[in-house]
Image (cartoon, grey):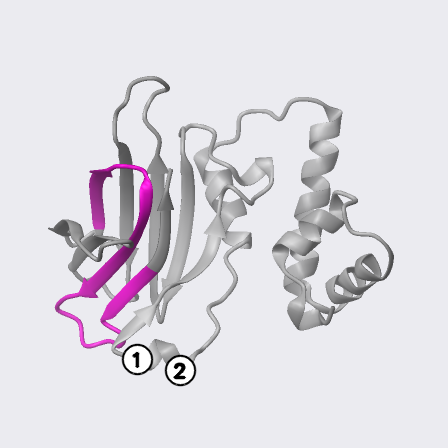
Amino acid sequence: MTNRSVTLEDVLAWIAGERTGDEASAIMRAVERDPALAAHARLARAVGEATAAGPLPDVSPEVIRAAQSIFRAPAKPSIIDRATAAIAELLFDSRLAPALVRDRTISGYQLGYRAGATDIDLEIQKPAAGSGGAHRLVGQIVPETQAVADVDLIDASTGRVVHSLRTGSDGHFEVQCAPGRYRLRVELLSTEREPSLLEVQELDVG
């Protein structure tokens, strides 16, 4: 395992005692060399110590957002960012984060993506147990400069557009959908920045 191959999941597993031997040694060396991995390790240790001491207190939304920002790694430049439809990279998944950075006020989970200079923040809200209701997909498109965006939610298995809408200038949107696998295509309007056509290729709702 090289420094480049060590991921956030590896660091969290190492802190939890799930990595041993040579693998643990490689992760430790990577943490010592990489400030970002070291920050993840410090936060994971703090969460573990707080959890061992007793139930975590309620955490304000401001603290949650600040903690989540630690787990947002900078996007890596890629040739695909200059393609016609840039593929958005997953930067944050609250299902993989320690308890401290989970927003316990929602019943679902949060995802953060980036393509070029644009962030795509998503929240999947699950229906109440036994209600048979649809999931809610709440999102915000955050380009470097303010822009309206057209958003298509596409069934990944059929290629059919399930929902098509336009955001306001704040980039917010919301749709209801059944559990399943989707693609999310975003076209930034009234902006000359590239890329203007972005896509989240694998979006699991469930």
> Separation of disc 2 and disc 1 at Cα?
7 Å
At 66% from the left and 68% from the top, the residue drawn is: 5
Q: Which of the two residues, 176 or 170, is positioned nearer the viewer here? A: 176
For the view shown, which residue lies furthest in the right direction?
21
For the view shown, which residue lies furthest in the front direction?
158
Report the side of 28 relative to 43 (left or right): right
| Image quadrant in which you'd find residue 201 | bottom left
Q: Is 95 above or below relative to 121? A: above
Q: Which of the two residues, 7 or 193, is positioned nearer the viewer here? A: 7
Give the extent of the magenta segment: 172-200
| Image quadrant in which you'd find residue 7 | bottom right
Question: Quick one: SS at disc 1?
Answer: loop
Question: Quick one: SS at disc 2?
Answer: helix
> Could you tell me the amino acid type at mark 2?
Ile
> Could you tell me the amino acid type at mark 1?
Ala
The answer to whether the residues at label 2 and label 1 have Cβ atoms under 8 Å apart is yes
Residue 56 place in picture, x, y as percent: 62, 26
**What is the chief secondary structure element of the magenta stretch?**
strand
Residue 110 place in picture, x, y as percent: 41, 43
Report the side of 69 relative to 30 (left or right): left
State yes or no: residue 173 in magenta: yes
Name the image quarter holding the C terminus: top left
Tell me the residue that label 1 is attached to. 83
Q: Is 139 above or below relative to 118? A: above
Name the image quarter holding the N terminus: bottom right
Tell me the residue that label 2 is attached to. 79
Residue 108 place in picture, x, y as percent: 40, 33
